[in-house]
Image (cartoon, helix red, strand yellow):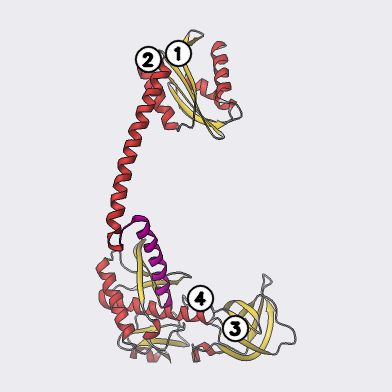
């Protein structure tokens, strides 16, 4: 099969002969052509998409030496001559990203001797994994600057088929994974690399490159970047975000950081004030509850059903109550939507085992929880109201 994408990576339409159609093990139809401009997935570059005689090509793979064009629908049996159309926007994007990766990897190696261990061409961003555990912002900027200088110089990107014996004539950046059908992609005096992908004819076709972020990956550093038209897309998206935030913060772009710091500072102060107010409110509520004691089977108890209280608030109130009265037994419930939360606590002079009470409560409300003999907590469903469960606790104490 002739691989037209190697003869002319800019070829967008072609006409060829259909060799055959078949189905793979999963039942998907694919076409084998006499020649093709569709690039199959490989070497970190995704496959091309497009159409064959107006039938959508959804995937292209090279399997057992043949290029399979997977189709959305089978071509008519009468099809002999086939017209292929490449999704050019997708193809050229892949060409820009792949060439951008060559440039960026070469820059990191030339400047800092950091080798690229892997490359991923994603739908939105691309990544390379560098063989280093540390990478500074200054190094990233220096590599990015070198790449964009090479792009502006519009150097040729050459491809050459060579033999194993001829490899010694080229300073390759990494060892090759093949020993036959060796194809080199060369940016003279900068990068010499074995590669089966498609690239622009010159570095100017990459247009520009921008690194986005880095993260540690085991013993490597992963650098995210975009090239070509994706740089403009990223700039447009980020500019929209900056404009919206600038309007919301009522601050110019260069003053946004200070505006956010100011808002975060105010937020922390307000959060502290809110916490202090909640604590005071809990104290008032605990004081009010402390006067609402009753005696059940010789035990002094305080019981209450509260609305929309967090578990931490119930726990805090219970601790305040038992620390104020050492003979008290406290049963607090909070009704929060469709959930019922429970806290039980006893003072130091009470011998009531709260775990025994909690086990019964959790049975009533189909819930779960835990704790110690003097303090328990948990939650469950509101099959019963808090008041109904309190009645059951009173009945339990009377019959204990």
Q: Which-is-in-front pick, marks 1 and 4?
A: 1
Query: Looking at the image, is mark 3 or mark 1 earlier in the sequence?
Result: 3
Q: For this rendering, which residue is in front, 4 or 206?
A: 206
Q: Is residue 276 above or below residue 153?
A: above
Query: Looking at the image, is mark 3 or mark 2 earlier in the sequence?
Result: 3
The answer to which image quadrant residue 84 occupies is bottom right
CA distance separating discs 3 and 1: 86 Å
Q: Quadrant of the N terminus?
A: bottom right
Please tell me whether mark 1 sits on a helix, a strand or a loop.
Answer: loop
Q: Is residue 219 left or right of residue 182?
A: left
Q: Which-is-in-front pick, marks 2 and 1?
A: 1
Q: Which-is-in-front pick, marks 3 and 4?
A: 4
Crowding at label 3, few (<14), some or many (≥20) Cα neighbours within 10 Å?
A: few
* Residues at marks 2 and 1 touching, judged by CB atoms closer than 8 Å: yes
Residue on which the image places disc 4: 46
CA distance separating discs 2 and 1: 11 Å
Residue 325's disc is 2
Residue on which the image places disc 1: 293
Q: Is residue 126 visible?
A: no
Residue 66's disc is 3
Crowding at label 2, few (<14), some or many (≥20) Cα neighbours within 10 Å?
A: some
Q: Is residue 386 above or below residue 257?
A: above
Please tell me whether mark 2 sits on a helix, a strand or a loop.
Answer: loop
Magenta span main SS: helix
Residue plotted at (55% across, 27% down):
362
* Residues at marks 3 and 1 touching, judged by CB atoms closer than 8 Å: no
CA distance separating discs 3 and 4: 17 Å
Crowding at label 1, few (<14), some or many (≥20) Cα neighbours within 10 Å?
A: some
């Amino acid at each position: 099969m002739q691989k037209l994408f190697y003869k002319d990576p800019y070829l967008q339409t072609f006409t060829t002969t259909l060799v055959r159609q078949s189905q793979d093990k999963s039942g998907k139809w694919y076409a084998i052509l006499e020649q093709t401009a569709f690039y199959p997935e490989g070497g970190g570059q995704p496959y091309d998409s497009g159409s064959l005689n107006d039938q959508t090509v959804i995937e292209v793979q090279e399997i057992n030496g043949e290029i399979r064009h997977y189709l959305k629908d089978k071509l008519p049996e009468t099809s002999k001559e086939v017209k292929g159309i490449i999704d050019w926007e997708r193809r050229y994007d892949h060409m820009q990203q792949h060439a951008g990766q060559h440039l960026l990897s070469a820059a990191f190696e030339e400047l800092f001797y950091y080798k690229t261990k892997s490359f991923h061409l994603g739908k939105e961003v691309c990544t390379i994994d560098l063989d280093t555990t540390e990478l500074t912002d200054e190094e990233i900027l220096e590599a990015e600057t070198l790449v964009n200088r090479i792009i502006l110089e519009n150097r040729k990107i050459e491809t050459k088929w060579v033999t194993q014996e001829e490899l010694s004539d080229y300073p390759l950046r990494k060892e090759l994974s093949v020993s036959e059908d060796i194809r080199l992609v060369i940016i003279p005096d900068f990068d010499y690399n074995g590669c089966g992908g498609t690239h622009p004819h010159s570095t100017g076709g990459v247009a520009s490159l921008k690194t986005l972020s880095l993260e540690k990956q085991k013993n490597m550093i992963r650098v995210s970047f975009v090239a070509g038209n994706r740089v403009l897309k990223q700039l447009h998206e980020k500019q929209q975000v900056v404009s919206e935030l600038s309007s919301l913060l009522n601050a110019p772009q260069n003053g946004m950081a200070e505006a956010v710091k100011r808002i975060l500072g105010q937020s922390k102060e307000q959060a502290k004030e809110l916490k202090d107010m909640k604590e005071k409110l809990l104290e008032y509520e605990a004081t009010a509850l402390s006067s609402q004691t009753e005696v059940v089977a010789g035990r002094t108890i305080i019981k209450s059903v509260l609305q929309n209280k967090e578990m931490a608030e119930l726990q805090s109130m219970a601790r305040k109550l038992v620390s104020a009265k050492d003979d008290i037994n406290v049963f607090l419930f909070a009704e929060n939507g469709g959930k019922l939360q429970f806290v039980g606590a006893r003072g130091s002079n009470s011998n009531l085992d709260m775990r025994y009470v909690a086990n019964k409560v959790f049975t009533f409300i189909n819930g779960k929880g835990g704790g110690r003999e003097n303090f328990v907590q948990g939650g469950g469903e509101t099959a019963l109201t808090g008041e109904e469960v309190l009645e059951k606790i009173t009945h339990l104490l009377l019959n204990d």
